[in-house]
Image (cartoon, rainbow, N blue to C red):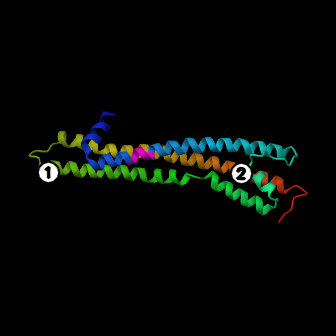
Amino acid sequence: MELLFTYITSGGIISTLVFIWLSIYFILTVWVWLSRYLTLNKWESIEKKSLEILLHGSRNISRDSILSRCLASGSTYNTLAICKSVAEKKATTSLSILSVISSTAPFIGLFGTIVSILNTFSQLGNAQTASLTVIAPAISEALVATAAGIFVAIPAYSAHVLLKRKAYELMNMIQREIELLSSDDNFYNG
């Protein structure tokens, strides 16, 4: 923690901007993860309840189900497929943000490291003597930005993969509901 504070205070404007940028990325990652995870969990329980109702032979699915609105407007297989497509878009909202964060955070950290190393070498060029005892601490401080970029990228990537899987499972559940609804003898295949 002390090394991070030293890096930020002695690094200059570029180092400060890199850490502000990475901090925003980290906060955004946590916010997207929590909000999407809770939303998808709630939605999954609604669709699970609707699927269970359909499996018991009733056609009266939960009012909160994404498919209930489609059934109210006249059910054709195409209508239900369009509803599933809309649900997929809704379920995967914000995944691109996590993808961008997980792929760019290491590069932002690397940029901060390179600028710090260039600054270190520039200062060493003006010094009378340069030894490993002078260079090593400066280089280790510069590598903090790369570590911070990786630190931000790992949770963003993990959240992206986990939320993508959760959305996939939700879409499978909705597809099973559509198949059950369309297998009904009174169902119109349009």
Is residue 100 or residue 147 the one in the foreground?
A: 100
Residue 75, percent across and down? Answer: 82, 59
Q: Amino acid at mark 1?
A: Gly
Is residue 42 or residue 101 the one in the foreground?
A: 42
Q: Residue at x 20, y 43 (%)?
A: 135
Residue 49, percent across and down? Answer: 77, 42
- Give SS at disc 2: helix
What residue does disc 1 label? Answer: 125
In the rendered image, the vertical position of residue 27 relative to residue 94, given as above or below = above
In the rendered image, the vertical position of residue 28 relative to residue 5, given as above or below = below
Query: Which image quadrant: the C terminus?
Result: bottom right
Dot 1 or dot 2, earlier in sequence: 1
**In the displayed structure, does residue 57 sit left or right of residue 102?**
right
Q: Amino acid at mark 2?
A: Asn
Q: Main secondary structure of the magenta part?
A: helix
Is residue 141 or residue 69 the one in the foreground?
A: 69
**In the displayed structure, does residue 59 sit left or right of residue 119?**
right
**In the displayed structure, does residue 176 sit left or right of residue 87?**
right
Residue 141, percent across and down? Answer: 28, 42
Q: Residue furthest bottom?
A: 190
**Range of magenta residues:** 21-25
Q: Residue at x 60, y 50 (%)?
A: 164
Q: Residue furthest front?
A: 73
What residue does disc 2 label? Answer: 172
Mark 2 nearby-residue class (10 Å; few <14, some 14–19, many ≥20): few
Is residue 133 or residue 77 the one in the foreground?
A: 77
Q: Residue at x 18, y 51 (%)?
A: 122
Residue 154, percent across and down? Answer: 47, 45
- Give SS at disc 1: helix
Q: Residue furthest left?
A: 128
